[in-house]
Amino acid sequence: AGLHAAAKASGKLYFGTAFDDPELSDLPFAALLNNTSDFGQITPGNAMKFDATHPTPTQYTLSRASSAVSLAAANGQLLRCHTLVWHSQLPGWITNPPTPWTNDTLTPVLQEHIHTLASAFKGRCAAWDVVNEALNEDGTWRDTVWYRTIGEAYVPLAFEVAAKADPSVKLYYNDYNIESEGAKAEGVRRIVKLVKDRGIPIHGVGLQAHLVSGSAPSTADLARVMVSYTALGVDAAITELDVRIKDADAGATAETRQATEYANVIKACKTVARCVGVTVWGISDRHSWVPGTFKGEGHALPWDKDLKKKPAYKAMIDAWMLG
Ligand code: G3I
Protein backbone atom coordinates (compact mmCIF):
# COMPACT_ATOMS: atom_id res chain seq x y z
CA ALA A 1 0.00 0.00 0.00
CA GLY A 2 1.17 3.51 -0.78
CA LEU A 3 1.14 6.89 0.95
CA HIS A 4 -2.52 7.68 0.31
CA ALA A 5 -3.66 4.22 1.32
CA ALA A 6 -1.64 4.55 4.52
CA ALA A 7 -3.10 8.00 5.26
CA LYS A 8 -6.61 6.62 4.78
CA ALA A 9 -5.83 3.71 7.08
CA SER A 10 -4.88 6.34 9.71
CA GLY A 11 -8.30 7.96 9.36
CA LYS A 12 -7.15 10.90 7.23
CA LEU A 13 -8.83 12.02 4.01
CA TYR A 14 -5.84 11.91 1.74
CA PHE A 15 -2.15 12.05 0.92
CA GLY A 16 -1.57 14.08 -2.21
CA THR A 17 0.79 16.08 -4.38
CA ALA A 18 0.98 19.25 -6.43
CA PHE A 19 1.81 19.00 -10.12
CA ASP A 20 2.24 21.43 -13.00
CA ASP A 21 0.62 20.59 -16.30
CA PRO A 22 3.82 20.70 -18.44
CA GLU A 23 5.16 17.87 -16.25
CA LEU A 24 2.45 15.54 -17.58
CA SER A 25 4.35 15.08 -20.85
CA ASP A 26 7.05 13.34 -18.75
CA LEU A 27 5.30 9.99 -18.98
CA PRO A 28 7.14 8.00 -16.27
CA PHE A 29 6.51 10.96 -13.97
CA ALA A 30 2.83 11.10 -14.94
CA ALA A 31 2.55 7.42 -14.06
CA LEU A 32 3.63 8.22 -10.50
CA LEU A 33 1.09 11.05 -10.28
CA ASN A 34 -1.67 8.75 -11.52
CA ASN A 35 -0.87 6.09 -8.94
CA THR A 36 -3.77 6.56 -6.57
CA SER A 37 -2.30 4.26 -3.97
CA ASP A 38 0.25 7.02 -3.30
CA PHE A 39 -1.73 10.10 -4.33
CA GLY A 40 -5.41 10.38 -3.51
CA GLN A 41 -5.37 14.14 -3.94
CA ILE A 42 -3.79 16.57 -6.42
CA THR A 43 -3.21 20.34 -6.47
CA PRO A 44 -2.49 22.24 -9.70
CA GLY A 45 0.70 24.15 -8.89
CA ASN A 46 0.15 27.03 -11.33
CA ALA A 47 -2.87 26.39 -13.58
CA MET A 48 -5.51 28.06 -11.38
CA LYS A 49 -3.55 31.18 -10.46
CA PHE A 50 -4.67 34.67 -11.47
CA ASP A 51 -2.13 35.09 -14.29
CA ALA A 52 -3.07 31.71 -15.77
CA THR A 53 -6.83 32.20 -15.56
CA HIS A 54 -7.54 35.90 -16.05
CA PRO A 55 -4.88 37.42 -18.36
CA THR A 56 -6.89 40.52 -19.36
CA PRO A 57 -9.76 42.32 -17.60
CA THR A 58 -12.41 40.74 -19.79
CA GLN A 59 -10.83 37.36 -20.60
CA TYR A 60 -10.84 34.13 -18.59
CA THR A 61 -8.60 31.28 -19.75
CA LEU A 62 -9.65 28.22 -17.79
CA SER A 63 -8.45 25.41 -20.06
CA ARG A 64 -5.36 24.49 -18.00
CA ALA A 65 -7.38 24.64 -14.82
CA SER A 66 -10.14 22.53 -16.38
CA SER A 67 -7.59 19.89 -17.39
CA ALA A 68 -6.55 19.58 -13.76
CA VAL A 69 -10.20 19.17 -12.77
CA SER A 70 -10.63 16.45 -15.42
CA LEU A 71 -7.45 14.65 -14.39
CA ALA A 72 -8.57 14.50 -10.78
CA ALA A 73 -11.99 13.24 -11.82
CA ALA A 74 -10.53 10.62 -14.18
CA ASN A 75 -8.24 9.33 -11.44
CA GLY A 76 -10.80 9.62 -8.65
CA GLN A 77 -8.47 11.99 -6.78
CA LEU A 78 -9.59 14.82 -4.52
CA LEU A 79 -8.70 18.25 -5.87
CA ARG A 80 -7.28 21.13 -3.85
CA CYS A 81 -7.83 24.28 -5.90
CA HIS A 82 -5.07 26.89 -5.64
CA THR A 83 -5.37 29.88 -5.34
CA LEU A 84 -7.92 32.72 -5.60
CA VAL A 85 -6.23 35.73 -3.96
CA TRP A 86 -2.45 36.09 -3.84
CA HIS A 87 0.08 38.88 -4.36
CA SER A 88 2.21 36.82 -6.76
CA GLN A 89 1.63 35.54 -10.30
CA LEU A 90 -0.74 38.41 -11.04
CA PRO A 91 -1.27 39.57 -14.64
CA GLY A 92 0.10 42.93 -15.80
CA TRP A 93 -3.33 44.54 -15.84
CA ILE A 94 -3.51 44.07 -12.07
CA THR A 95 0.08 45.02 -11.25
CA ASN A 96 0.36 47.92 -13.76
CA PRO A 97 -3.13 49.38 -14.24
CA PRO A 98 -3.56 52.38 -16.57
CA THR A 99 -4.91 54.35 -13.60
CA PRO A 100 -4.15 53.43 -9.99
CA TRP A 101 -6.60 51.06 -8.31
CA THR A 102 -9.03 52.40 -5.77
CA ASN A 103 -11.27 50.53 -3.36
CA ASP A 104 -14.16 51.20 -5.73
CA THR A 105 -12.40 49.88 -8.83
CA LEU A 106 -10.51 46.91 -7.34
CA THR A 107 -13.26 45.47 -5.13
CA PRO A 108 -15.48 44.43 -8.07
CA VAL A 109 -12.43 42.93 -9.82
CA LEU A 110 -11.67 40.78 -6.78
CA GLN A 111 -15.31 39.76 -6.45
CA GLU A 112 -15.72 38.89 -10.11
CA HIS A 113 -12.48 36.89 -10.25
CA ILE A 114 -13.38 34.80 -7.22
CA HIS A 115 -16.97 34.36 -8.29
CA THR A 116 -15.96 33.26 -11.79
CA LEU A 117 -13.40 30.67 -10.71
CA ALA A 118 -15.30 29.28 -7.74
CA SER A 119 -18.45 29.00 -9.90
CA ALA A 120 -16.61 27.43 -12.83
CA PHE A 121 -15.31 24.60 -10.64
CA LYS A 122 -18.26 24.41 -8.28
CA GLY A 123 -18.60 20.92 -6.83
CA ARG A 124 -15.23 19.85 -8.29
CA CYS A 125 -12.83 21.28 -5.70
CA ALA A 126 -12.65 19.62 -2.30
CA ALA A 127 -10.93 22.77 -1.01
CA TRP A 128 -9.99 26.21 -2.29
CA ASP A 129 -6.99 28.15 -1.03
CA VAL A 130 -9.04 31.34 -0.95
CA VAL A 131 -6.35 33.69 0.38
CA ASN A 132 -2.67 32.81 0.10
CA GLU A 133 0.26 34.36 2.01
CA ALA A 134 -1.42 37.53 3.33
CA LEU A 135 1.01 37.88 6.25
CA ASN A 136 4.52 39.18 6.87
CA GLU A 137 6.89 37.18 9.05
CA ASP A 138 6.04 39.43 12.04
CA GLY A 139 2.34 38.68 11.66
CA THR A 140 1.38 42.06 10.20
CA TRP A 141 -0.47 42.33 6.90
CA ARG A 142 1.69 41.90 3.83
CA ASP A 143 1.80 45.01 1.64
CA THR A 144 -0.04 43.76 -1.46
CA VAL A 145 -2.23 45.44 -4.05
CA TRP A 146 -5.22 43.86 -2.27
CA TYR A 147 -4.30 45.11 1.21
CA ARG A 148 -3.07 48.53 0.07
CA THR A 149 -6.25 49.20 -1.88
CA ILE A 150 -9.03 47.45 0.04
CA GLY A 151 -7.54 47.03 3.52
CA GLU A 152 -7.96 43.91 5.65
CA ALA A 153 -11.60 43.73 4.54
CA TYR A 154 -10.39 42.01 1.36
CA VAL A 155 -9.87 38.81 3.33
CA PRO A 156 -13.41 38.28 4.70
CA LEU A 157 -14.77 39.57 1.38
CA ALA A 158 -12.84 36.89 -0.51
CA PHE A 159 -14.20 34.11 1.71
CA GLU A 160 -17.74 35.50 1.43
CA VAL A 161 -17.71 35.54 -2.37
CA ALA A 162 -16.16 32.06 -2.58
CA ALA A 163 -18.71 30.62 -0.15
CA LYS A 164 -21.62 32.02 -2.15
CA ALA A 165 -20.24 30.68 -5.43
CA ASP A 166 -19.55 27.15 -4.14
CA PRO A 167 -21.37 26.50 -0.85
CA SER A 168 -19.94 23.00 -0.35
CA VAL A 169 -16.21 23.60 -0.93
CA LYS A 170 -13.85 23.87 2.07
CA LEU A 171 -12.39 27.37 2.22
CA TYR A 172 -8.78 27.71 3.40
CA TYR A 173 -6.35 30.38 4.47
CA ASN A 174 -2.92 29.12 3.30
CA ASP A 175 0.57 30.36 4.30
CA TYR A 176 4.21 29.34 4.93
CA ASN A 177 6.39 29.62 8.03
CA ILE A 178 3.36 28.97 10.20
CA GLU A 179 4.51 25.46 11.19
CA SER A 180 5.81 26.58 14.61
CA GLU A 181 4.47 29.01 17.19
CA GLY A 182 5.32 32.68 16.70
CA ALA A 183 4.10 36.04 15.48
CA LYS A 184 3.05 34.72 12.08
CA ALA A 185 1.06 31.86 13.65
CA GLU A 186 -0.65 34.48 15.81
CA GLY A 187 -1.48 36.37 12.60
CA VAL A 188 -3.10 33.24 11.17
CA ARG A 189 -5.35 32.93 14.22
CA ARG A 190 -6.23 36.62 13.83
CA ILE A 191 -7.30 35.96 10.23
CA VAL A 192 -9.45 32.97 11.17
CA LYS A 193 -11.20 35.06 13.83
CA LEU A 194 -11.54 38.08 11.52
CA VAL A 195 -13.50 35.97 9.04
CA LYS A 196 -15.48 33.96 11.59
CA ASP A 197 -16.45 37.00 13.67
CA ARG A 198 -18.28 38.37 10.66
CA GLY A 199 -20.27 35.17 10.28
CA ILE A 200 -18.44 34.29 7.06
CA PRO A 201 -17.34 30.68 6.50
CA ILE A 202 -13.68 29.64 6.80
CA HIS A 203 -13.05 25.92 7.11
CA GLY A 204 -9.34 25.42 7.29
CA VAL A 205 -5.78 26.61 7.69
CA GLY A 206 -3.26 25.34 5.14
CA LEU A 207 0.28 25.03 6.46
CA GLN A 208 2.45 25.06 3.35
CA ALA A 209 5.42 23.48 5.15
CA HIS A 210 8.25 24.42 2.79
CA LEU A 211 10.77 23.15 5.32
CA VAL A 212 14.53 23.44 5.55
CA SER A 213 16.34 20.25 6.50
CA GLY A 214 18.11 20.77 9.80
CA SER A 215 15.59 23.31 11.06
CA ALA A 216 12.30 21.53 10.39
CA PRO A 217 9.79 21.59 13.25
CA SER A 218 9.52 18.76 15.75
CA THR A 219 6.38 16.63 15.77
CA ALA A 220 5.35 18.24 19.07
CA ASP A 221 5.82 21.84 17.88
CA LEU A 222 3.98 21.23 14.63
CA ALA A 223 1.13 19.40 16.34
CA ARG A 224 0.83 22.16 18.94
CA VAL A 225 0.54 24.97 16.40
CA MET A 226 -1.95 22.96 14.32
CA VAL A 227 -4.09 22.48 17.41
CA SER A 228 -3.93 26.25 18.05
CA TYR A 229 -5.62 26.66 14.65
CA THR A 230 -8.11 23.80 14.90
CA ALA A 231 -9.12 25.00 18.40
CA LEU A 232 -10.73 27.94 16.58
CA GLY A 233 -13.13 25.52 14.90
CA VAL A 234 -11.40 24.91 11.56
CA ASP A 235 -9.54 22.02 9.94
CA ALA A 236 -5.81 22.03 9.25
CA ALA A 237 -3.98 20.60 6.24
CA ILE A 238 -0.33 20.35 5.27
CA THR A 239 -0.60 21.80 1.77
CA GLU A 240 2.84 22.19 0.13
CA LEU A 241 5.29 19.96 1.97
CA ASP A 242 8.91 19.74 0.88
CA VAL A 243 12.17 19.57 2.85
CA ARG A 244 15.09 21.18 1.08
CA ILE A 245 18.74 20.22 1.43
CA LYS A 246 21.85 22.22 0.50
CA ASP A 247 23.60 20.82 -2.59
CA ALA A 248 26.81 20.74 -0.56
CA ASP A 249 25.18 18.38 1.98
CA ALA A 250 23.38 16.11 -0.50
CA GLY A 251 23.86 12.40 0.01
CA ALA A 252 22.82 9.46 2.14
CA THR A 253 23.28 11.17 5.52
CA ALA A 254 21.18 14.14 4.46
CA GLU A 255 18.47 11.87 3.04
CA THR A 256 18.26 9.99 6.33
CA ARG A 257 17.73 13.20 8.27
CA GLN A 258 15.22 14.38 5.68
CA ALA A 259 13.30 11.11 6.04
CA THR A 260 12.90 11.75 9.77
CA GLU A 261 11.75 15.30 9.08
CA TYR A 262 9.12 14.08 6.61
CA ALA A 263 7.99 11.44 9.08
CA ASN A 264 7.67 14.05 11.83
CA VAL A 265 5.16 15.96 9.71
CA ILE A 266 3.10 12.81 9.15
CA LYS A 267 3.17 12.01 12.88
CA ALA A 268 1.98 15.52 13.72
CA CYS A 269 -0.92 15.30 11.28
CA LYS A 270 -1.75 11.89 12.68
CA THR A 271 -1.99 13.16 16.24
CA VAL A 272 -4.12 16.22 15.38
CA ALA A 273 -7.73 15.10 15.01
CA ARG A 274 -8.65 17.89 12.59
CA CYS A 275 -5.56 17.58 10.38
CA VAL A 276 -7.30 16.26 7.26
CA GLY A 277 -4.36 15.33 5.06
CA VAL A 278 -0.89 16.00 3.73
CA THR A 279 0.13 17.28 0.27
CA VAL A 280 3.71 17.32 -1.01
CA TRP A 281 4.65 20.17 -3.39
CA GLY A 282 5.77 17.80 -6.10
CA ILE A 283 6.82 14.17 -6.31
CA SER A 284 10.34 14.10 -7.66
CA ASP A 285 13.45 16.28 -7.51
CA ARG A 286 13.22 16.22 -11.31
CA HIS A 287 10.38 18.76 -11.10
CA SER A 288 10.68 20.99 -8.05
CA TRP A 289 10.43 24.76 -7.58
CA VAL A 290 13.25 24.76 -5.00
CA PRO A 291 16.47 24.95 -7.10
CA GLY A 292 14.99 27.76 -9.21
CA THR A 293 14.28 29.87 -6.14
CA PHE A 294 17.01 28.89 -3.65
CA LYS A 295 20.38 28.77 -5.34
CA GLY A 296 22.44 25.84 -4.11
CA GLU A 297 19.48 24.03 -2.54
CA GLY A 298 17.18 21.25 -3.69
CA HIS A 299 16.73 17.49 -3.16
CA ALA A 300 13.48 18.42 -1.41
CA LEU A 301 11.01 15.74 -2.52
CA PRO A 302 10.42 12.05 -1.69
CA TRP A 303 11.47 10.74 -5.13
CA ASP A 304 14.88 11.56 -6.60
CA LYS A 305 15.69 12.88 -10.10
CA ASP A 306 15.64 9.33 -11.48
CA LEU A 307 12.16 8.81 -10.02
CA LYS A 308 13.54 6.45 -7.39
CA LYS A 309 12.02 6.54 -3.92
CA LYS A 310 14.21 8.20 -1.29
CA PRO A 311 14.23 7.17 2.40
CA ALA A 312 11.50 9.78 3.04
CA TYR A 313 9.01 7.54 1.26
CA LYS A 314 9.28 4.56 3.59
CA ALA A 315 9.64 6.84 6.61
CA MET A 316 6.28 8.43 5.77
CA ILE A 317 4.59 5.06 5.22
CA ASP A 318 5.94 3.86 8.57
CA ALA A 319 4.84 7.07 10.27
CA TRP A 320 1.29 6.57 9.02
CA MET A 321 1.20 2.85 9.81
CA LEU A 322 3.21 2.39 13.02
CA GLY A 323 3.07 3.86 16.51
O1 G3I B 1 5.50 29.82 -17.77
C1 G3I B 1 6.84 30.33 -17.84
C2 G3I B 1 7.55 29.80 -19.05
O2 G3I B 1 6.89 30.27 -20.20
C3 G3I B 1 9.02 30.24 -19.01
O3 G3I B 1 9.70 29.65 -20.08
C4 G3I B 1 9.68 29.83 -17.70
C5 G3I B 1 11.10 30.34 -17.59
O4 G3I B 1 11.45 30.58 -16.27
O5 G3I B 1 8.92 30.35 -16.63
C6 G3I B 1 7.60 29.88 -16.60
O6 G3I B 1 6.93 30.41 -15.48
C7 G3I B 1 7.32 29.87 -14.25
C8 G3I B 1 6.12 29.19 -13.61
O7 G3I B 1 6.45 28.74 -12.32
C9 G3I B 1 5.67 27.96 -14.42
O8 G3I B 1 6.71 27.00 -14.46
C10 G3I B 1 7.82 31.00 -13.37
O9 G3I B 1 9.01 31.54 -13.89
C11 G3I B 1 8.04 30.49 -11.98
O10 G3I B 1 8.32 31.60 -11.14
C12 G3I B 1 6.82 29.79 -11.47
O11 G3I B 1 7.11 29.30 -10.19
C13 G3I B 1 6.00 28.89 -9.44
C14 G3I B 1 5.97 29.72 -8.15
O12 G3I B 1 4.92 29.26 -7.34
C15 G3I B 1 5.78 31.19 -8.43
O13 G3I B 1 5.69 31.91 -7.24
C16 G3I B 1 6.17 27.43 -9.11
O14 G3I B 1 6.07 26.66 -10.30
C17 G3I B 1 5.11 27.01 -8.11
O15 G3I B 1 5.36 25.68 -7.69
C18 G3I B 1 5.15 27.94 -6.92
O16 G3I B 1 4.19 27.55 -5.99
C19 G3I B 1 4.11 28.35 -4.80
C20 G3I B 1 2.67 28.29 -4.34
O17 G3I B 1 1.80 28.70 -5.35
C21 G3I B 1 2.44 29.13 -3.09
N1 G3I B 1 3.39 28.76 -2.05
C22 G3I B 1 4.79 28.76 -2.44
C23 G3I B 1 5.00 27.85 -3.65
C24 G3I B 1 6.46 27.76 -4.02
O18 G3I B 1 6.97 28.98 -4.45
Image: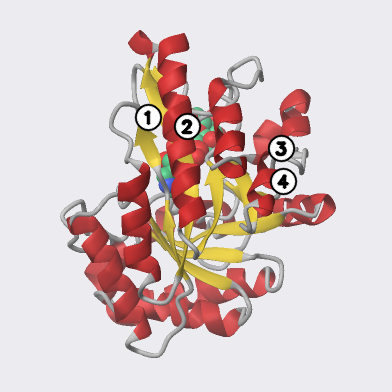
Q: Which mark is residue 289?
A: 2
Which residue lies under the disc numbered 4?
5
Could you tell me if the residues under marks 4 and 2 are in contact, i.e. CB atoms within 8 Å? no
Identity of the amino acid at label 4?
Ala
Q: Is mark 1 within 8 Å of ligand 1?
A: yes
Write the residue at 35% across / 27% down. Answer: 213
Which residue lies under the disc numbered 3?
2
| Pointer 3 local density, CA inside 10 Å: few below 14, some 14–19, many at least 20 | some
In screen coordinates, is 320 left or right of 220? right
Q: Earlier in the sequence, mark 2 or mark 3?
A: 3
Q: Tell me if residue 198 comes above or below residue 302 in the rendering.
A: below
Write the residue at 32% across / 65% down. Answer: 228
| Pointer 1 local density, CA inside 10 Å: few below 14, some 14–19, many at least 20 | few
**Disc 4 on helix, strand or loop?**
helix
- Outermost bottom residue: 199
Image location (x, y in percent) of residue 58: 56, 68
For marks 2 and 1, give the CA distance. 7 Å
